[in-house]
Amino acid sequence: MKQVVDALRKNPTAIDVIKANCQYYQQQAYLKKGLKRTIEHLEWILAADDDIERICQQIMADDHIGNKCRQYPLLFKGVNQPQKSE
């Protein structure tokens, strides 16, 4: 997860990848209640603040929301990969 946070700090536009992952998983027919709730929490974090440093702190925080975010690494899939330029 540290690699994800480092990638976010280097490339703040990777937030769009996280948002896309959240939307993708919310569209799935069968989601565990915990994952659904974690997606909601992560979306709250992303909607509440534009500051990448505070978003990274929330993800790595040693609290309930931070622990839940780190429990589902699929939500951060693609953040470490280099972004394709169009």
Image (tube, rainbow, N blue to C red):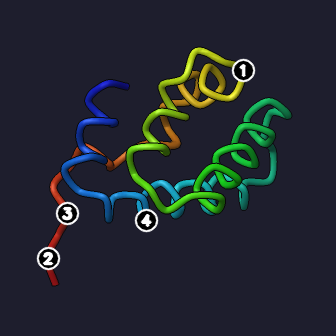
User: Which residue does the numbered mark 4 point to in the structure image?
Assistant: 16
Residue at 61%, 55% in the rendered image: 22
Q: Are circles 2 and 3 on residues that touch, CB within 8 Å?
A: yes
Q: Quarter holding the C terminus?
A: bottom left
Q: Which residue is mark 3?
A: 83
Does dot 1 land on a helix, a strand or a loop? Answer: helix
* Disc on the earlier residue, 4 or 1: 4
Residue type for callout 3: Gln
Question: Where 62 sits versus 54, above or below?
Answer: above
Q: CA distance from mark 2 to mark 1?
A: 36 Å
In which quarter of the view is residue 38 placed? Answer: top right
Q: Amino acid at mark 1?
A: His
Q: Which residue is mark 1?
A: 64
Q: Are marks 2 and 1 in contact (CB under 8 Å)?
A: no
Q: Is residue 82 above or below residue 73?
A: below
Image coordinates for residue 53, horizontal then vertical, percent: 39, 44
- The answer to whether the residues at label 4 and label 1 have Cβ atoms under 8 Å apart is no
Residue situated in front as seen by the camera: 57 or 41: 57
Question: Label 2: which residue?
Answer: 85
Q: Residue at x 19, y 63 (%)?
A: 83
The crowding category of the residue bearing disc 1, from other C-alpha atoms within 10 Å (few below 14, some 14 to 19, many at least 20), is few
The correct choice, above or below, for 36 with respect to 21 in the image is above
**Whole-number angstrom distance, CA of label 3 to CA of label 1:** 30 Å
* Quarter containing the N terminus: top left
